[in-house]
Image (cartoon, grey):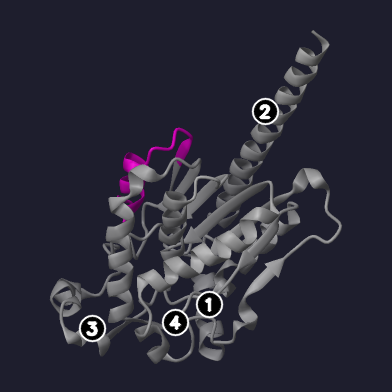
Amino acid sequence: MSYEIDFELRHIDKDTDKNCGVLLFHGLTGSPFEMKKYGNFLYELGFDVFCYSFPGHGENLDDIQKVTYKDWCNFAQEKYSELRPQYKDFFVSGLCLGAAISLYLAENNKDLTGLIALSTTLFLDGFCMPKRKCLMPIALKTIFRYFYTFPEDECLGVKNTTTRKSLAKLMSKTTIGMDNYPLNCVYELLSLSKFVRKNLKKVETPILIIHSKFDNLTSVKSAKVVYDNISSQNKKYIELEDSYHMVLYDNEKQFVMNSVAEFIHDLVKSDKDESIAEKDATLENACV
């Protein structure tokens, strides 16, 4: 997969009041392509948006066999550290694996303005998981994890049949993502999940969690574990009723994006209000 699919959407002539950046993370075996419409939506609202391919995600399955979850974490932290100083307000948002990585960043960076977790994947317990998944715990602990893959399920994480057909056609012609899950990749995802779950109490960042009740890959258990164990005072959980895993492309996609926009705007507005209040207090004290 070419890294040309990475994207950076920056406003050249930007109002200083909109000095806000958003770093997006795609899903397991996916690519920035799946975040592009989401990114364009946020860009049109006035935010600078960034999304990059995770290490190991490409056409060659051998590439993903060579990386660990620590490579994903280090990559995300590197991008965050590079971009964060450029903005007054900065958000991270991820889908699937990307949501877990976003939580990792929130556990380790207290200067994060807000986090949006979509279809957070901490457990592989969705309704479309392969029938052979009962053998997975055994395979994951052996050398077989380097040789076995299981295919993407037929629904492609999308309930809307028209969109599903379009995605299937697109995937057959391009390299926007892998059409299977290498077992070693799953092993690393679950290792990341264990690591993130252990440190959820460190998350104090305002957070919006969106998850479908009918997620084919990971049940609402993942979202509820996050919501119940983080330390964030400002936290909101939205459960969808008419989508599968790919909530940015399914029947409730516009509702999802609008909810994200409202969440970000509320936090940025609150930040501005506090800044104005502080200035007023300073002026008032100066006049006394």
For disc 2, the neighbor class at 10 Å (few under 14, some 14 to 19, many from 20) is few
Image quarter of the N terminus:
bottom right
- Give the residue type that dot 2 points to: Glu
Q: Which residue is mark 4?
A: 56
Image marks 1 and 2: residues in contact by CB distance under 8 Å? no
Image marks 4 and 3: residues in contact by CB distance under 8 Å? no
Of badges 2 and 3, the one in the foreground is 2
Question: Residue 37: percent from the left, percent from the top?
Answer: 64, 65
Q: Which residue is mark 2?
A: 274
Residue at image point 36% right, 50% down: 223
* Alpha carbon separation for disc pair 1 and 4: 22 Å
Sequence-earlier tag: 4 or 2: 4
* Alpha carbon separation for disc pair 1 and 3: 28 Å
Sequence-earlier tag: 1 or 3: 3
Q: Secondary structure at mark 4?
A: loop
Sequence-earlier tag: 1 or 2: 1
Q: Which residue is mark 1?
A: 167
Is residue 140 toward the left or the right of residue 230 in the image?
Answer: left
* Alpha carbon separation for disc pair 4 and 2: 42 Å
Residue at image point 14% right, 76% down: 135
Q: Secondary structure at mark 3?
A: helix
Image quarter of the C terminus:
top right
Residue farthest right in this picture: 13
Q: Secondary structure at mark 2?
A: helix
Q: In the rendered structure, which segment of residues is drawn in magenta?
A: 219-236
Is residue 103 toward the left or the right of residue 228 in the image?
Answer: right
- Give the residue type that dot 3 points to: Arg
Sequence-earlier tag: 2 or 3: 3
